């Protein structure tokens, strides 16, 4: 399918927002800012952005992740930083051709917007090394309400609300800052409308193509916190012929408070998520029911939860036999208590929930198959198996711990530029 067409369709849903679209009656110089004003803005290859939220973590819109090649580097404050792995939310869905082809033929994209509204357009990028000279942006964990003013920063396609911009315009321009007021906030999304003067804010604007994954900030005290990520735009009329960025168009952004449990779970997960960087399929199998463990087996899970929550590597290692194994995805096997303790150093600190799906127990050998989650969010994010051993009548100890996340490999995706 032609790349240009895919871009057009993406616009009905996602504008890689960038340099910002501004008021026609305000000097562009009033919107422009220096790169040093927001060094935590991350440039994705070609177009699109992310935001540094921890020394080794970047958050972005899932559709900015390259489709058929590994994401090797991102640019932060003008320098390339190597990427260790990418974690795409398992609920991210790519557009099916059954929706793309009719939109190509008719220019009508309402069902595309409906489809996009049900997708989890969010991804986390773990950097190969920490960024130590740039302050990460604090995540806003509370819900943004309609009427709240947000700050927008980007350097993608630009124009003004009266004329808009064309699809072929550059997706990398100067860095600009604008403001807007949230008009709706629900579930996955926070949205705003680009109002026409005199109803507009003094420096009102909207993100334009080229800045998907860019920042949407809300002011808390004297600090601007990251509340959203630019994702998609509602464009009225024929999507192949429309001018984008005009007044009254609505831009929708990923609502980060909706994803806090997932974000915290991924960042503190004991095993790295899949490095596969194609889009996850929307597979939602039925969740398996829990089983009740005998008290002596249940104690193993509860002790593990407590050790993880406390970030106590020594206590976690003590749950294993002396020559036990930790088998985490995409990492070499770890054997022995000392090595296990070293492997767990720096992990944990989040609320881990373990539940059993099946178990077996003999006199001296046992096992637990289970699932895990983080925080209060419903549903499991991963699964595990524990093999166990004990002296006759003694406490159960872990012989091996194997776990991985539930995210499915990504296979296809719409281009983001």
Image (spheres, helix red, strand yellow):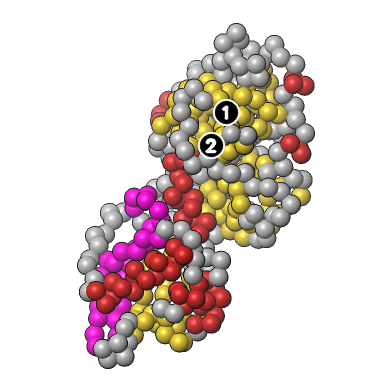
Q: Are discs 2 and 1 less than 8 Å apart at CB?
A: yes
Q: In which quarter of the image is residue 383?
A: bottom left
Q: Can residue 250 be seen in this view?
A: no
| Picture coordinates of residue 180, whole percent (x, y) | 58, 23
Residue, disc 2: 228
**Structural distance between the alpha carbons of marks 2 and 1:** 9 Å
Residue 112's mark? Answer: none
Q: Name the residue under label 1.
A: 150
In terms of depth relative to the viewer, which is nearer, 186 or 252?
186
The residue that appears at 50% across and 72% down in the rendered structure is 313
Residue 293 visible in the displayed image: yes
Q: Is mark 2 on a helix, strand or loop?
A: strand
Mark 1 residue crowding within 10 angstroms, few (<14) / some (14–19) / many (20+) = many
Q: Nearer the viewer, mark 2 or mark 1?
A: 1
Against 187, residue 387 (above or below) is: below
Q: Eyeballing the image, is 150 above or below 307?
A: above
- Name of the residue lying farthest toward the front: 221
Sequence-wise first label, 2 or 1: 1
Q: Residue 79 vs residue 221: left or right?
A: right
In terms of depth relative to the viewer, which is nearer, 275 or 237? Answer: 275
Q: Residue 61's spot in the image, x, y percent?
A: 55, 42
Q: At 75% from the left edge and 16% from the top edge, which residue is drawn?
A: 27
- Residue nearest the viewer, comparing 63 with 348: 348
Q: Residue at x 57, y 28 (%)?
A: 150
Quick check: 93 left or right of 355? right
* x and y percentages locating residue 91 in the rendered image: 42, 46
> Over which residues does the magenta segment extend?
352-379
Question: Residue 148: where, in percent of width, then height?
Answer: 51, 25
């Amino acid at each position: 399918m032609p790349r240009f067409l895919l871009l057009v369709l993406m616009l009905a849903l996602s504008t890689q927002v960038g340099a910002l679209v501004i008021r026609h009656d305000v000097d562009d110089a009033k919107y422009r800012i220096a790169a040093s004003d927001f060094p935590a803005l991350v440039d994705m290859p070609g177009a699109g952005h992310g935001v540094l939220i921890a020394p080794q973590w970047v958050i972005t819109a899932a559709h900015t992740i390259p489709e058929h090649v590994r994401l090797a580097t991102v640019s932060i404050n003008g320098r390339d930083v190597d990427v260790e792995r990418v974690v795409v939310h398992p609920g991210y869905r790519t557009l099916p051709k059954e929706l793309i082809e009719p939109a190509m033929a008719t220019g009508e994209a309402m069902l595309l917007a409906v489809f996009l509204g049900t997708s989890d357009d969010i991804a986390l990028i773990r950097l190969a090394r920490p960024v130590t000279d740039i302050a990460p942006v604090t995540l806003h964990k509370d819900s943004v309400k309609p009427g709240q003013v947000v700050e927008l920063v980007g350097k993608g396609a630009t124009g003004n609300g009266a004329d808009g911009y064309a699809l072929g315009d550059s997706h990398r321009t100067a860095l600009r800052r604008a403001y807007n007021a949230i008009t709706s906030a629900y579930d996955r999304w926070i949205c705003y409308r680009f109002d026409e003067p005199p109803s507009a804010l003094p420096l009102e604007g909207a993100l334009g193509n080229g800045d998907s994954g860019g920042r949407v900030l809300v002011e808390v005290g004297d600090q601007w916190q990251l509340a959203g990520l630019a994702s998609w735009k509602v464009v009225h009329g024929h999507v192949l012929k429309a001018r984008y960025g005009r007044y009254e168009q609505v831009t929708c952004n990923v609502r980060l408070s909706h994803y806090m449990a997932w974000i915290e779970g991924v960042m503190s997960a004991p095993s790295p998520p899949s490095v596969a960087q194609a889009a996850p399929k929307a597979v939602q199998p039925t969740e398996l029911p829990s089983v009740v463990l005998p008290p002596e087996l249940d104690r193993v899970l509860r002790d593990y939860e407590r050790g993880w929550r406390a970030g106590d590597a020594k206590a976690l290692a003590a749950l294993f036999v002396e020559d036990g194994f930790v088998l985490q995805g995409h990492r070499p096997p770890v054997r022995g208590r000392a090595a296990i303790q070293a492997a767990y150093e720096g992990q944990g600190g989040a609320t881990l929930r373990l539940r059993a799906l099946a178990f077996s127990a003999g006199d001296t050998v046992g096992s637990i198959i289970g699932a895990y989650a983080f925080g209060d969010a419903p549903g499991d994010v991963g699964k595990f198996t524990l093999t166990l051993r004990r002296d006759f009548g003694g406490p159960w100890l872990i012989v091996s711990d194997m776990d991985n996340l539930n995210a499915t490999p990504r296979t296809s995706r719409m281009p983001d530029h």
